[in-house]
């Protein structure tokens, strides 16, 4: 657990204790508290989810591998999509259900029971929680497909929850975000415990609407009517309009408050990861200026040579990840303006009634990604946007948006993987050691197969088989 979260909680608990509570606590074990505050739970869950999304640790998730942004030097099981050796699905399942969703559910209960909060404050805080919960649910659905949903988080009454249809869950998540808009506008939510926006409710509103836009555009092929109405609703209410709106977590320079990337790339002292030739080759072909940000120049000025994806690679002879990503304070990304702009570009391309046109949103997305990478030279950006394989062309819209969207999600790898599954662009490599096909989902955790067998079997049959090649419901083209 992050140290600053613990410090915050201790200070909060001391400040809120009455004299009666002081004597009651004499009978409590201080190392095993029976209850923590909603403030602590909200911060803890938000950071836990952010850490999970950012981490490159193969024991936690392999999104940077399945998106083919990174590959390995020595241990190549994971770049060849071996999910069972380290039981990676179980790690994600436990992390999201236990350390994110359950903590946030408990926080809701504490908020509702807190007599010191006005109803407007309660509503606003629950609105913030709803956004993080919807985000976490989407991570689970986009990874596994059908999952326990309404019967989940009820360990005391239901230890064997049934799975529910992933498409139906998505519909409910969109409704929850639409309802959260009203809650967020009710009053002031979390301030100090809010490690994303520091209590800026206008930005939480934009985050809510931008997340709704993400869900809406994910289902544009599988449920066009809901996609259109939900995307238009989100755009009309107000989404991110610049990088200043980005939903990010700012990490600190000293352990244990650092970005998980630094922990595995630097603190570990290991040399396990290099840039994958998949993304390096594509960006080399485009002479993409973001190479100086994404990659190190350890092979010489302007020289970038990715490791062969899925094969063993020499660390010293392959391009390393960029210096910025080895900084302990490197921010973790939940959702950014570049992603929002790519969604708006696709919505416009589908003739949804959203502001702006496809080309403008497409160029805005690439520009936002460039700016975030520290590239502010507009002439250099315009030169890139005018390249034949970059310049927007309505006849080649899917390939252009898909490829540029995937490049821009380099530091948000789950979205990079989802982008590839959604647009089928760009062409990814088969891993060098096995030539296994790129997964379109994770298989269910072994614990589910053993402990929740009946529901697991029913879910596996419902989705068409528990394999890495069974697509999520929205991946229909």
Image (cartoon, rainbow, N blue to C red):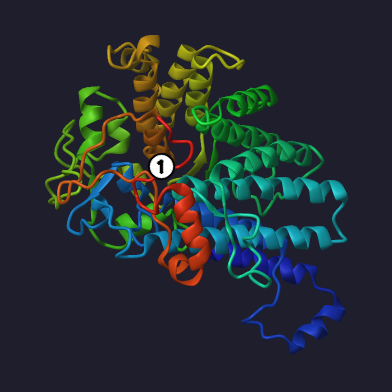
Give coordinates of residue 261: x percent, y percent: 37, 52
Left or right of 218? Residue 117 is: right
Identify which residue is drawn at 75% across, 89% down: 27
For mark 1, what is the residue?
A: 471
Left or right of 282? Residue 391 is: right
Identify which residue is drawn at 42% across, 32% down: 422
Count neighbours of disc 1 (C-alpha within 10 A) and say few if under 14, some if 14 to 19, many if 20 or more: many
Identify which residue is drawn at 60% across, 17% down: 354
Q: Quadrant of residue 377?
A: top left
Give coordinates of residue 443: x percent, y percent: 39, 55
Give coordinates of residue 455: x percent, y percent: 53, 62
Identify which residue is drawn at 58% across, 28% down: 227
Please state, as top left, top right, bottom left or bottom right, where the C terminus lies in the image: top left
Q: Nearer the viewer, residue 363 or 469?
A: 469
Residue 246 seen by the camera: yes
Left or right of 412? Residue 133 is: right
Q: Quadrant of residue 90?
A: bottom left
Give the tally of numbered discs.
1
Left or right of 371? Residue 290 is: left
**Is 342 drawn above or below residue 203 in the view shown?**
above
Give coordinates of residue 298: x percent, y percent: 18, 42
Residue 200 seen by the camera: no
Considering every residue shown, the one lying at the far bottom of the view is: 27
Q: Nearer the viewer, residue 239 or 377?
A: 239
**Is 168 drawn above or below residue 253 in the view shown?**
above
Q: Nearer the viewer, residue 167 or 367?
A: 167
Q: Secondary structure at mark 1?
A: loop
Q: Quadrant of residue 398?
A: top left
């Amino acid at each position: 657990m992050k140290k600053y979260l613990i410090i915050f909680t201790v200070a909060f608990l001391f400040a809120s204790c009455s004299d009666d509570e002081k004597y009651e606590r004499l009978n409590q074990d201080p190392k095993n508290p029976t209850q923590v505050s909603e403030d602590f739970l909200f911060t803890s869950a938000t950071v836990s989810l952010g850490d999970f999304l950012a981490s490159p640790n193969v024991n936690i998730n392999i999104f940077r591998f399945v998106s083919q942004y990174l590959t390995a030097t020595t241990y190549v099981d994971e770049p060849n999509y071996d999910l069972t050796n380290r039981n990676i699905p179980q790690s994600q399942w436990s992390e999201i259900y236990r350390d994110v969703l359950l903590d946030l559910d408990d926080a809701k209960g504490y908020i509702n029971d807190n007599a010191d909060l006005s109803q407007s404050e309660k509503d606003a805080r629950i609105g913030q929680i709803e956004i993080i919960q919807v985000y976490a649910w989407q991570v689970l659905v986009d990874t596994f497909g059908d999952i326990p949903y309404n019967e989940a988080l009820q360990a005391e009454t239901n230890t064997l929850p049934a799975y529910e249809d992933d498409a139906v869950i998505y519909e409910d998540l969109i409704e929850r975000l639409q309802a959260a808009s009203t809650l967020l506008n009710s009053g002031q939510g979390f301030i100090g415990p809010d490690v994303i926006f520091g209590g800026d409710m206008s930005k939480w509103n934009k985050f809510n609407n931008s997340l709704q836009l993400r869900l809406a555009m994910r289902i544009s092929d599988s449920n066009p009517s809901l996609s259109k109405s939900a995307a238009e609703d989100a755009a009309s209410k107000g989404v991110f309009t610049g990088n200043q709106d980005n939903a990010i977590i700012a990490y600190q320079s000293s352990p244990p408050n650092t970005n998980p990337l630094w922990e595995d790339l630097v603190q570990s002292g290991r040399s396990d990861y290099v840039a994958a030739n998949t993304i390096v080759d594509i960006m080399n072909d485009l002479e993409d200026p973001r190479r100086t940000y994404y990659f190190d120049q350890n092979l010489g000025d302007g020289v970038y040579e990715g490791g062969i994806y899925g094969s063993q690679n020499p660390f010293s002879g392959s391009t390393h990840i960029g210096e910025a990503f080895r900084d302990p304070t490197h921010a973790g990304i939940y959702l950014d303006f570049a992603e929002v702009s790519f969604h708006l570009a696709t919505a416009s391309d589908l003739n949804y009634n959203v502001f702006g046109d496809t080309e403008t949103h497409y160029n805005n997305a690439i520009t936002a990604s460039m700016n975030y990478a520290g590239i502010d030279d507009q002439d250099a950006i315009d030169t890139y946007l005018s390249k034949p394989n970059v310049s927007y062309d309505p006849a080649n819209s899917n390939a252009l948006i898909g490829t540029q969207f995937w490049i821009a999600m380099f530091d948000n790898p789950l979205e990079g993987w989802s982008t590839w599954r959604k647009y089928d662009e760009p062409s990814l490599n088969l891993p060098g050691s096995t030539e296994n096909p790129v997964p379109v989902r994770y298989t269910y955790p072994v614990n589910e197969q053993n402990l929740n067998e009946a529901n697991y079997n029913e879910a596996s049959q419902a989705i068409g088989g528990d394999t890495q090649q069974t697509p999520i419901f929205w991946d229909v083209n």
